[in-house]
Amino acid sequence: MAPAARPGWPPEPLHLLLYGSGMARFIFSRLAIGLVTLFVVSALFYLGTEMLPGDVATAILGQSATPANVAKLRLSLGLDQPSWLRFVNWLWGCLHGDLGKSLASGRPIATLLLPRLGNTLFLAACAALIAVPLALTLGILSALHEGKATDRASSALSLGIISMPEFLVGYGLIIVLSVHLGWLPSLGTVFPGMALGLRLKAMALPILTLTLVVLAHMLRMTRATILAEMAAPYVEMARLKGLDRRRIILAHILPNASGPIIAVVLLNLAYMVAGAVVVETVFVYPGIGQLLVDAVTKRDLPTVQACGLVFAIVYVGLNTGADVLALVFNPRLRHRR
Amino acid sequence: MQDKRYPHLAASGFTLDRRRFLTGAAALGLGAGLLPGLSGRAFADGPVSGGTLRLGMSGGSTTDVLDPRTLTDWVPVNVSYQIYNGLVEIDETNQAVPELLESWESKPGAAEWIFNVRKGVTFSNGKTLDADDIIYSINLHRGETTSGIKSTLAAIADVAKVTDSQIKITLTSGNADLPFILSDYHLMVVPKDFTDWANPIGTGGYVLESFDPGVRIVTKKRDGYWKAGRAYVDAIETTVIGDTTARTNALLTGEVDVINRLDPHAIDMLKGNDAISVTRNSAGQHAVFLMNCTAAPFDDVNVRMALKYGIDRQKIIDTVLRGYGVLGNDHPIPRTSPYHADLPQRAYDPDKAAFHLKKANLSSLSVDLSVSDAAFAGAADAGVLYQAAAAKAGITVNVKREPADGYWSNVWMKAPFCASYWGGRPTVDQMLSVAYLSDASYNDSFWKRPDFDKLVIAARTELDDAKRKELYFEAQKQISDDGGAMIPMFIDYLEASASHVKGVGTHPQFDLMGQRIGEKVWLEG
């Protein structure tokens, strides 16, 4: 795609930045919108936690919440400051890479968050490694065999699973695979220094649950997009040329359908990270979702904020990624008409 | 996330409620029927050493620290008892027995006490225990501190060293129950000047191996533990499992050996399973419907009596607790306490309720009852059952469901009629002092009677047991016949263990054998 006479200097990324092109401008505007979204989300998160009844001092002290103790703790936690000031301070810290300290335990949030985030990402990555290829293959197969038994079976199955909340899928798997058959552990507890084999075994059911939950969405989207393209004139042309259905789908439709498919895959990846809260709770998997639940019950505002920020970054980042990748895969979007 | 037994602890406004000092259980054999693991055969084999005990517990979070002053949840308390020792232990018959304090005596009047420190005990860093360590550990909770038992220990005027193995405690006024007060789980013993709570040093049977708060905590047995006949297992893995279903599943699939806080509704499912034993700790934890004695219509004792007769206690126990509870008689002292007043059991009686209503010059009565599962698991259901029963006596109980979040700060001691609960206390005096004395900070029924106060204060220094019993009998009778706390039931703690865990028993204070299960049980096979 590069223009034939482009000079060697400046290198392409810088060149794009300086002289602009459709794509660079597009990416920058996406990033800018992403940042604004992040700000709005963190403000909303903050408002939401502020509106919860009770405060962190009584939540931390629990049984020891005598009025004197509460007053003392509130002062030492800086809760006497107005809430907007605390929000601004927090935001300022974040911009400098300082997520602050947990109100409840006094430990730096980054040290709490990073291992948990690592666990969640590892879980999501494992599930994605299985779910994405499987969903695409099954989706393409369904489209190939539209209306036949395989297509109907996969439609019925995926519709069934997509209609079930993930905790139900999780409990169902536990009952069958752990309690009755005893093949896999029901507890997803992992810890630092755990052997990889053991870790994967503990994670097997959470991975399977996540896979099943996101599989259906991606599968159906792949199938629907391909079938929608079927009606396009160029497909008719290909068919008139005498190409077989398999070749039409793989060589002609798939590149054109890739935009929506990539978007739904990336959205599902985001869902696996942010939506893992439920799966992590069912399987007691120590990821960021559990941390968030813990932090909410303790009114640990900075930790809740940090978790919210991470989720927002994942969502916004993957969404932006989806837009950009769609562009890369679809030349028509790259050049402004 | 969904553990209904726990959220109320996190947001509570009680001073002592998580402690749930439960008074007595095993002595009356209340739990024996459910304890196949406690058969004579199991004991005849004798304890064996070795193996790893895996506990699956609710009551832990990422914020847990092993600082004795901040102990508020069950996982850190349990782990602390693996690593540290207390001053005094409460045995299964609810007696205060020596732990690091080897023996004690009080001067007449029970205001001055001499305690002897156990000799030959070493910390895991090699230091030998002496009086300075004990004094430091007590003083962590006195003076400038946010410790949960600061107010309890305010009764201590002075802690002084007599010799290296003897201390003297002076109280502001006499209290015959001091050894019980010193059994509090906050009073873990650490070396003098110790502050490194991330690397705890104690005299307990185990040392910290890894600490991943809210996830998993591992301790390893150490050499030369001073207690004979304790600390059999080589290591203890405590996994935090907040979700009740996940906890039960983990036990069923053999991933953990013991779980706490069993859902009564899950018991029927476990009953037919030979590989699992259920333990029932009947003790002092009780549900209470609080009437504000200073607010109309509850300021009329006849209204209070009408409401006390208008509830079907047995039905609530059978339905909400699936039978895992004991009838309450509108006073907070459980049957397991030696001072329990055996008053005639108040039963559901719509006629009597109507009679008392008439005495109050009312033909009908309509009251709002605030409930939430934060008060106790099943409180909302109990409220609805109450509503149905009271209707037959001409009393309309409007059940108001309140959010569990903020229940203790927004509803408790604010709504004139609301559900609540109290954990038990090791002594009658503590229970009555915390919630029933006229000037008690948690006098949550706003019931004030000077003659009652006199009884409680007189009993405190009464060393003659028979006389003390009389005083406490009168005090309980007054609460039952006049007070604003309607106590329908005492709620059992339920826990379950795999049958290869031997030596499991009940405890009158709290579940998991007073949270000391780690050093008490052994594994077979």
Image: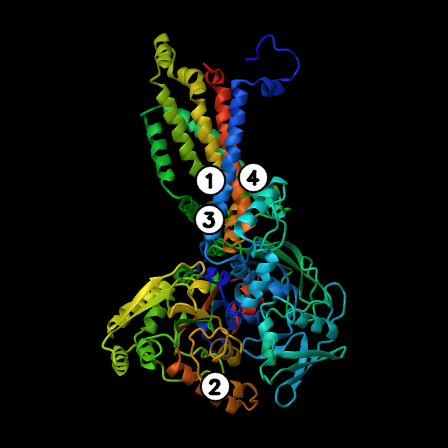
Do marks 1 and 2 share a chain? no
> Closer to the N terminus: mark 3 or mark 4?
3
Separation of marks 1 and 2 at Cα, in angstroms: 59 Å
Q: At numbered mark 4, what does the secondary structure look like: helix, strand or loop?
A: helix
Q: What is the chain letter for disc 3?
A: A
Q: At numbered mark 1, what does the secondary structure look like: helix, strand or loop?
A: helix
Separation of marks 3 and 2 at Cα, in angstroms: 49 Å
Separation of marks 3 and 4 at Cα, in angstroms: 29 Å
Do marks 3 and 4 share a chain? yes
Q: Nearer the viewer, mark 3 or mark 1?
A: 3
Query: Can see residue A144?
Result: no
The residue under label 4 is which amino acid type? Phe
Q: At numbered mark 2, what does the secondary structure look like: helix, strand or loop?
A: helix
- Can you give x and y, in whole percent of width and height, for residue A303 in the image? 56, 49
Question: Answer yes or no: do the residues labelled 3 and 1 have beta carbons within 8 Å?
Answer: no
Q: Nearer the viewer, mark 3 or mark 2?
A: 3
Residue at the disc numbered 1:
A210
The residue under the point 37% across, 20% down is A229
Q: What is the chain letter for disc 2?
A: B
Do marks 3 and 1 share a chain? yes
The residue under the point 60% across, 8% down is A5
Q: Nearer the viewer, mark 3 or mark 4?
A: 3
Separation of marks 4 and 2 at Cα, in angstroms: 61 Å
Q: Residues within 10 Å of mark 3 (few under 14, many from 20)?
A: few
Question: Answer yes or no: do the residues labelled 3 and 4 have beta carbons within 8 Å?
Answer: no
Q: What is the chain letter for disc 1?
A: A
Do marks 4 and 1 share a chain? yes
Residue at the disc numbered 2:
B472
Do marks 4 and 2 share a chain? no
The residue under the point 66% across, 72% down is B138
The residue under label 3 is which amino acid type? Gly
